Amino acid sequence: MTHQLSVRDRSVWIVGLLFKCPLGTPELHCPLQDLRDTPIGERIRAVYGMPDREKERVICRHQACLAAREQANTQVSLSTV
């Protein structure tokens, strides 16, 4: 899916992820966690300075993490029914 996003759109997406994990608590090995602890300006500069391949990697990792965690949450919800 990310191949359809422009370089600018990828950057904007990653900047959004730098403010907070969409699922609340990030995974232990989230590639963005260290950047979340830096000043806002530094976060933004880091994203816009990332090579395109790195942006692609971060977004793919995010999508895989999101899918896995949503699936796990669904399975837990179904097991309690």
Image: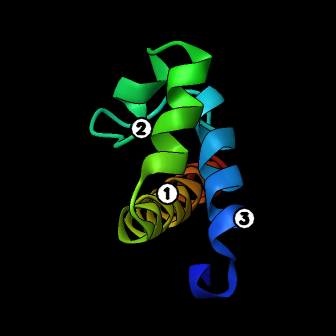
Viewer-nearest of discs 2 and 1: 2
Look at the numbered disc 2 and give the secondary structure of its residue.
loop
Rendered view: 24 above or below 75:
above
Q: Nearer the viewer, residue 73 or 62?
A: 62
Amino acid marked by disc 2: Leu
Where is residue 5 drawn, in percent x and y? Answer: 68, 78
The residues tagged by marks 3 and 2 sit, at their Cα atoms, a distance apart of 17 Å
Number of other residues with Cα within 10 Å of mark 1, as a class: few under 14, some 14 to 19, many 20 or more? some
Look at the numbered disc 1 and give the secondary structure of its residue.
helix
Viewer-nearest of discs 3 and 2: 3
Can residue 52 be seen? yes
Viewer-nearest of discs 1 and 3: 3
Q: How is the image coloured?
A: rainbow
Q: Nearer the viewer, residue 12 or 68?
A: 12
Amino acid marked by disc 3: Asp
Number of other residues with Cα within 10 Å of mark 2, as a class: few under 14, some 14 to 19, many 20 or more? many
Look at the numbered disc 3 and give the secondary structure of its residue.
helix
Quarter of the image holding residue 44?
A: top right
The residues tagged by marks 2 and 1 sit, at their Cα atoms, a distance apart of 9 Å
Q: Which residue is mark 2?
A: 32
Which circle marks residue 2 in the picture? none
For marks 3 and 2 on the same chain, the one whose residue lies earlier in the sequence? 3
The residues tagged by marks 1 and 3 sit, at their Cα atoms, a distance apart of 15 Å
For marks 2 and 1 on the same chain, the one whose residue lies earlier in the sequence? 2
Where is residue 3 drawn, in percent x and y? Answer: 58, 86
Can residue 20 be seen? no
